[in-house]
Amino acid sequence: MADAPVNPAEEAAAKSWEKLKRALDAGDSFVFEAGAGAGKTYSLLQTLDYLIEERARELMRRKQQIACITFTRIARDMILKRTDSNPVVYCETTHAFAWGLMRQFKRQVREAVLALDAWSERLAEVEAPSTLEVDYDLGHRVIEDGKLSLHHDDIFPVLIHLLDNPKFRAVLTSRFPIILVDEYQDTDAALIAALERYFFGVKGAPQFGFYGDHWQKIYGDGVGMIEHPALARIDKGANFRSVKPVVDGLNRIRPELPQIERDPDLPGMIRIFHTNGWAGKRQSRNHWQGDLPADKARAAFLRTRVALEEAGWDFAPEHTKILMLTQRALANELGYGSLPGIFRYNDAFARKADPHIAWFVDQLEPAVQAFEARRFGAMFEALGRRAPPVRGAADKKRWSQTMTRILEIRANGTVGDMMAHLLATGLPVLPDDVAKSERKLAALIAEGEERSRRLVEIEKLKAVPFTEITELARYHAGTSPFETKHGVKGDQFENVLGVFGRGWNDYNFDNYLRVARNPGAAANTAAFERARNLFYVVCSRPKERLALLFTQKLSDESLETLTDFFGANSLIDIGGQL
């Protein structure tokens, strides 16, 4: 028998668990909506424990399993550990789960891949594409030795194609009568549409459980909210993370999912700093419009920090997380300040959309760090297919020499020095798209011809010290006191300072705040929801203290919204102090 609830949050959680158990026992599919701090993962594990206790023997007798689909490997590993890798639970990431089913249908998978536009150029150079073996290993598009290796982006279109096949659906249903999906809001929207088409409300379909929070959707192709008559809605109105002042603010931001804190007597603090009182000329260039000049934005950040330190904040990384929602400020603080001036869009480096940046950050930097630590297996694992096999002492010596030189360039050279070395040695092997861009750029420079914007960006990138790439990689790895949205969803910190400014093409927080209390007035629903979700994620991270700094000028309506959310006494104009 479960222990009796001992605080208000536990009482709210107990009510949601009773509703969830009823849905599980009835075989009803459901959406389990757990706001920030509610303990969504705890409820998912609670579900698995309950199903293992109640259904494991029956499922194992039928050679069936409970599918638990996660968005990240970290979540997968945690769930496997917490369930002691029970054989009745099949837990995998979305992509790995899909491939595990698809690989049994080799002919149908190949047919689907051959029809994908993303493969048309590569397949045009292959004599007999219908004979290729399809594989999914490292997530890069490669054709070699009669094998076609899928990209991560290929998995969902192929899976959706296979869901049209009744035999494939039968195999899925037979093996997995219960399918639990973690972080449902970030699941591919087209995939959810296919599940709705073939399974929701269909007799004999698997029981689906979707766990997440559509206000915490942070990936552009995610479905966000799931609504369907066949899906029961179960809300978890608890907040085990934050103190009452923060929870009260969250409830005013999101009144449709009210939460109850664990202890109403715990103290907290909220401060909202803005710069409307600054009388100087603000930026006017495209998506920087209305923001402070860079030097004044930094001055505002420093002034805010001083004010919070005077109020008792400890800015040691273990106590305070600074969430920079303006990439230029973040870049300057972390040591890669050249990058915002090189790329037209912040996504090129902030989300690694540029192939050069992605290669440096995701593969070369981890490989170099592993080499430096003499973890050679990890080095080759990081490089994947970009690491030719080591067949003898000569290969070992060649690898040692090239990696030693990479370490030297990494410390003292430029991106251009690094690319020259990689191209000259052929170790590690560059990705196809990076190598192709390098060849094209070299040819156009030699011929004196005009370059595309993308190639101009690569040319400018080569002048950047490689130490900036190292710092960018450190940021993406989460080893910095600064962060942005992708690194912190699900995390919690004692204190949080969120810095909101312009510089993002996808976000304008003044536009959001202006209509936050009347969403129907939003001119662009998608843009409104992007900004709303990010604002909510930031405001819901702290356990004790929350501070926000706005470097962009706010409208009167936005100031009224902030007053409504957090109270008039929380707002402080520091513009006159810059």
Image (cartoon, rainbow, N blue to C red):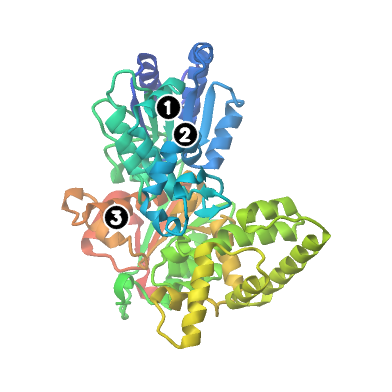
- Whether residue 510 is situated above or below residue 209 in the rendered picture: below
Measured as percent of width and height from the top left, residue 185 is found at 37, 41
| Circles 1 and 2 in contact, beta carbons < 8 Å | yes
> Would residue 421 be found to the left or right of residue 432 on screen?
right
321 or 302: nearer the viewer: 321
Evaluate whether residue 294 shows in this view.
yes
Disc number at residue 179? 1
Measured as percent of width and height from the top left, residue 233 is found at 30, 28
Measured as percent of width and height from the top left, residue 478 is found at 56, 55
Residue matched to label 3: 562
312 or 100: nearer the viewer: 100
Indicate the quadrant where residue 452 lies: bottom left
479 or 226: nearer the viewer: 226
Between the C-alphas of marks 1 and 2, the distance is 8 Å
Residue drawn at point x = 30 percent, y = 78 percent: 279
- Whether residue 115 is situated above or below residue 554 in the rendered picture: above
Q: Earlier in the sequence, mark 1 or mark 2?
A: 2
Q: Earlier in the sequence, mark 3 or mark 1?
A: 1
- Whether residue 300 is situated above or below residue 52 in the rendered picture: below
